[in-house]
Image: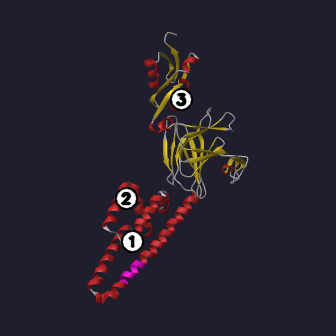
Amino acid sequence: MLKNKIQAQSPEVISEACAWIAQIETGDLTFADRVALREWLGRSPRHLDTLKKMAQVSMDMNVMVHFSGALEQAAVLAESKKKEVRLISKQWFVPFFSIATILLISMSFILFLLREQQLNERPMMVSTEKGGFEEVVLSDGSIVKVNTDSQLEVHYTNEFRKIRLLRGEAYFNVASNPRRPFLVYANGQYVRAVGTAFIVKALKERPFSVAVVEGKVEVGQTLTSGVGKDGQQGNREIDAGVGNSQFVPSYVVAGQRLSLRDDNVSVEINTISGEALERELSWQDGVLEFSETSLAEVFKELNRYSGMSVAFSEPAISEIRIGGIFPSNKPELVLDALEANYGIVVNRINPNSVVLSRTGR
């Protein structure tokens, strides 16, 4: 039970908690250290919870605190009663040796648990419905934000951090760890990152794309095998085709977007402005931002969130361009804006289907 509780904690928080326990057990806490400890505990309820769990690995926290006080009293007594130095030193040495031994054993146990956790993390599925949104903090501190109607699989091993974006769109803010590459697989492509932030889109009837917000990523085709390492049938990615000269990767830096062309093989890399990147990320705030965007694209995007079907009485209407910021789950506000400002008539066929036409036609 304790092992499961420890595994649920962030490795970074566990490391910090262990450092505090080590300092508490030595009894070497200055006033400044106590202030820093209170500040650390106040940052998050997880900190106190983790500190208590780590204390259980070695000994109960209250026992440790009492031990620390007893050591200070022993030192004072030794100063005032020098004739009893030998006896007091013996009393002081035994518990100190016990504490050091327990701490060494507990730290080894914690490191074992962390290593075992890395090796044995089971794949985790994250999915969203239409209009849904999920934010997940992974065990290494990386953050994944999953947009509407999307699904991905997270699988961490001791060598790799692997994500399979099965459909939809996700934003990744990757914790740096050069020894464990972060790989995202989607649409027969891979994205390799160490410490960076980027968006991956794998949408139906749209080209695969990667937009880099921070840092640099490598993008290329994956190799697949008919049989996986576990013996199961089905295509499995062979780690990014590394070392295969027939697959030449592309490198995309912050402020660039890579898109697959119609042949799903050749790529196009374009520079995008900071404003365009902000629009790419606006869904994380529950809104969609458009700038000189055709109505055909506007409603294609809104359809991902609401499921509303919009038809145009003539092709020219679909080419009308608009701009603005709208709640992603309220397409009716866009319809209201079209009626008020663009002379468009909204003919509601049913709650989920409308036809747009011009006034007087």
Q: Residues within 10 Å of mark 1 (few under 14, many from 20)?
A: many
Determine which quarter of the picture holds residue 54.
bottom left
Q: Do the numbered discs 2 and 3 sit on residues whose CB atoms are within 8 Å?
A: no
- Residue at image mark 3: 303
Q: Position of residue 75 (x, y in %)?
A: 31, 80
Q: Nearer the viewer, residue 169 or 55?
A: 169
Label 3 is placed on what type of residue? Asn
Label 2 is placed on what type of residue? Trp
Q: Position of residue 77 (x, y in %)?
A: 28, 82
Q: Position of residue 267 (x, y in %)?
A: 65, 38
Residue depicted at 47% across the width and 72% down the height: 104
**Numbered badge on residue 40:** 2
**Numbered badge on residue 234:** none
Residue depicted at 29% across the width and 88% down the height: 82
- Asked whether residue 240 appears in the rendered view, the answer is yes
Determine which quarter of the picture holds residue 296.
top right
Q: Going by the picture, which residue comes out furthest to the bottom?
A: 83
Range shown magenta:
90-97
- Is residue 191 on the magenta stretch? no
